[in-house]
Amino acid sequence: MAVYTQVSAEEIDRFLTRFDVGTLVSVKGIAEGVENSNYLLETTQDKYILTLYEKRVDPADLPFFIALLDHLSAHGCLVPPMIADREGKKIQQLCGRSACLITFLSGVSVSSPTTTHAAAMGEALGDMHRALADFDQERRNVLDHDGWRALAEQCGPAQLDKIAPGLATAIAQELDYLDEHWPHDLPRAAIHADLFPDNVLMLDDKISGLIDFYFSCTDVRAYDLAVTHAAWCFSEDGTDFHDKISQALITGYASTFPISDAERKALPLLARGAALRFLLTRAYDWINTPADALVTRKDPQAFLNRLEYYQTHPDVFAI
């Protein structure tokens, strides 16, 4: 979450007249994240999230996200559906942007997950994958393996090497390796693709919400577990791997959704891909984020460290 488009309280107050949600009491911009403009609203009835979709989110993808959240909610998963206005519309226009009013979920994101948190996360991810087994809509992963080389080229070798000496060469070598070994015969399904701890809400060590589905797409299902592993099982800077967190996450997931032998064998490679994907997108954002944006840039080096760990520890998923 972030704020790129500034919206006044008066504009938000007028926006809310389309809905049966009460009148505006307070509004606060949310600085975390790098994708959209987000505001926490409090009205005379409840709290809500107002999201304005910026350039990385294609408005044409919003019906997929809405359908996915509605499907998960109907299957008992703790996710925040978009709210329809009095005419039944969920996609709005505000300040020249597509916008949605979204259900607010209580809870906090943990910065240092425990094994209890990790086990709960694994179980919730497995529950989500089970719920999506009969979801039939598809969306291409615009940040999949086929797009990583182009993203590296957009960053540029010189700019990458400013982030870390030799980074451009390291990325090029990893791209070549993944091109040669990437699996193409694993089960595919709708996935979240971005389940970092800050996209998970918790209350009393239990999951209270999974949020920010704007990278959700159709891809290798086990890749979702690999992304979550890379996000949860290291220190924030990626220099320390937490084996007990890893074991709790994988065991929790397997308790609610089975991992096939082929998927388990592919997980180390999928994790390398996950680390490279976030290294590249963080590098791109590091290079291109406007100086005046109300947003916290995230260090690409943290995922270079993860990538190097996965490269040298192919047994990391063994339990």
Image (cartoon, rainbow, N blue to C red):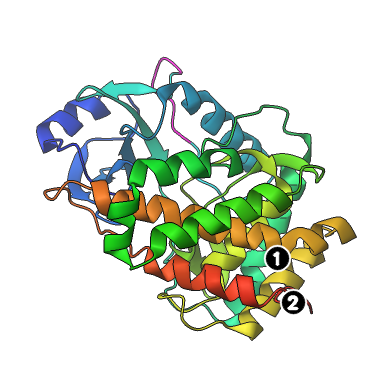
In the image, taking residue 249 as reference, residue 143 lies left or right, namely left
Q: Any mark on residue 268, and which?
A: 1
Does residue 195 appear in this view?
no
> What's the amino acid at mark 2?
Asp
Q: Horizontal and vertical percent for residue 67?
A: 59, 29
- Residue at x 60% of width, y 35% of height: 68
Q: Quadrant of residue 71?
A: top right
User: Residue at point 72% right, 70% down?
Assistant: 250
Q: Nearer the viewer, residue 7 or 234?
A: 234
- Tell me which segment is drawn in magenta: 82-88
Callout 1: few (<14), some (14-19), or many (20+) C-alpha neighbours within 10 Å?
A: many
Q: Quadrant of residue 184?
A: top right
Residue 235: x and y in percent read: 46, 79
Q: Picture coordinates of residue 176 (x, y %)?
A: 60, 51
The disc placed on residue 209 is: none
Q: Which circle marks residue 315 in the picture?
A: 2
- The amino acid pointed to by label 1 is Pro
Query: Label 2 neighbourhood size at 10 Å, few (<14), some (14-19), many (20+)?
Result: few
Q: Is residue 73 left or right of residue 38?
A: right
**Secondary structure that dominates the magenta span:** loop
- Tell me if label 1 and label 2 are in contact, CB under 8 Å: yes
> Which residue is pictured at 33% across the width and 56% down the height?
160
Residue 316 versus residue 173 in the image, above or below: below
